[in-house]
Amino acid sequence: DTAVSQTPKYLVTQMGNDKSIKCEQNLGHDTMYWYKQDSKKFLKIMFSYNNKELIINETVPNRFSPKSPDKAHLNLHINSLELGDSAVYFCASSPVGLETDTQYFGPGTRLTVL
Amino acid sequence: GQNIDQPTEMTATEGAIVQINCTYQTSGFNGLFWYQQHAGEAPTFLSYNVLDGLEEKGRFSSFLSRSKGYSYLLLKELQMKDSASYLCAVRDGDYKLSFGAGTTVTVRA
């Protein structure tokens, strides 16, 4: 029944490591997103993909690389993790073409870099 | 960049009404959303306004004035479970969604 799922839910790792977060949606949506929510609860968009193509790429270090193998999946790979990468990362999806274009969020992945 | 402002915190009593204001300045406008986020959980959609006026959905209503760059979310008959953060988000001319920092609402018995 899960609409937007992310794995893992929690990720604790050392500085300098490389890690990936996976996201899948079973809603049949065309567009998927990655957001970062920092300790001040500010939710900021990082990337957006529409039908496997990158359409939004905010000012994000190139250590962050999204990959969309198909329109139901959008994974986020992070190289050389830094302390400032600690945050909650949310995946979301939305149906393009509908009036409201409401975004549905996954449960989030809490990343802690030590 | 986009500029979206909302109060940081609000406190109200169970059964009361609370109004959360949001002002915005964006490059173009394609709709305003309100999301609710409980601590440690994902944001969930509450309401959407693209035309001026009031949209009512049960105990929650949202108002938009595009000329003033202003919206509010009205929560009526507050319940303890309404304690959460409420995020105002605006979709700009490029259809990119930008979020405000959120308003933490605490409902007291």
Image (cartoon, rainbow, N blue to C red):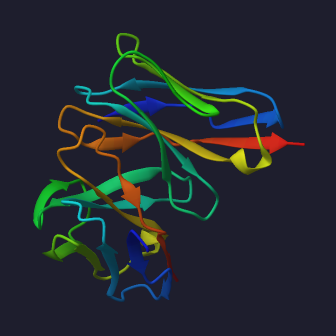
Q: Where residue A21 sits: x, y (%)?
A: 35, 80
Q: Is residue A23 left or right of residue B46?
A: left
Q: Where residue B78 sits: x, y (%)?
A: 76, 37
Seen from this angle, which residue lies furthest right? B109
Q: Where residue A88 sits: x, y (%)?
A: 48, 67
- Residue A22 visible in this rendered orientation of the protein: yes
Q: Residue at x 17, y 37 (%)?
A: B94
Above-or-below relation of A101 to A38: above
- Residue A63 visible in this rendered orientation of the protein: no
Q: Quadrant of residue B69?
A: top left
Q: Residue at x 17, y 74 (%)?
A: A68
Q: Residue at x 18, y 75 (%)?
A: A67
Foreground residue, B78 or A111? B78
Q: Quadrant of the N terminus of chain A?
A: bottom left
Q: Where residue A51 sits: x, y (%)?
A: 11, 63
Above-or-below relation of A31 to B98: below
Seen from this angle, which residue lies furthest top? B67
Q: Is residue B16 left or right of residue A59?
A: right
Q: Residue at x 23, y 43 (%)?
A: A98
Q: Quadrant of residue B29?
A: top left
Foreground residue, B80 or B5? B80
Query: Number of numbered discs present?
Result: 0
